[in-house]
Image (cartoon, rainbow, N blue to C red):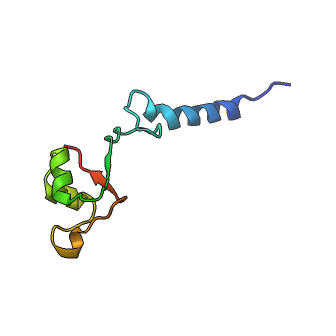
Amino acid sequence: MKKSYFPLILIAGALIFAFSGCIGEQQNMQGWPGPKPEPIKHHTVQKGDSISLIAEQYGVLPQQLAASNGLGLKGSESTIYPGQKLVIPIK
């Protein structure tokens, strides 16, 4: 009796087709095709820190730092607390 290899060939072809897009492309950290995510910097707020002081320390504008963390620059919108982690925008 002759065996049919058609189902195996069909499965192999489907797998090759599914993964052919991954070959030669840059992969992100999860191994999927796509651009590598940029590294993220964080700053843990210390007593006496302010948005403007932290921004100056990392060479970014206070507006950029505030926007990256959903903060404002005036009144209670700009309140940060010791122990709070802030995302530092990358230039």
In the rendered image, residue 48, in percent from the top left (x then y), is placed at 24, 59
Q: At 37% across and 39% down in the image, what residue appears?
A: 34
Q: Quadrant of the C terminus?
A: top left
In the rendered image, residue 9, in percent from the top left (x then y), is placed at 64, 30
Q: Quadrant of residue 27?
A: top left
Q: At 24% across and 66% down in the image, what residue appears?
A: 71
Q: Nearer the viewer, residue 27 or 48?
A: 48
In the rendered image, residue 17, in percent from the top left (x then y), is placed at 51, 35
87 shown above or below 3: below
21 shown above or below 76: above
* Residue that sits furthest to the front in the current view: 47
* Left/right of residue 30 with respect to residue 25 in the rendered view: right
Q: Quadrant of residue 5?
A: top right
Q: Quadrant of residue 13?
A: top right
Q: Nearer the viewer, residue 60 or 12?
A: 60
81 shown above or below 26: below
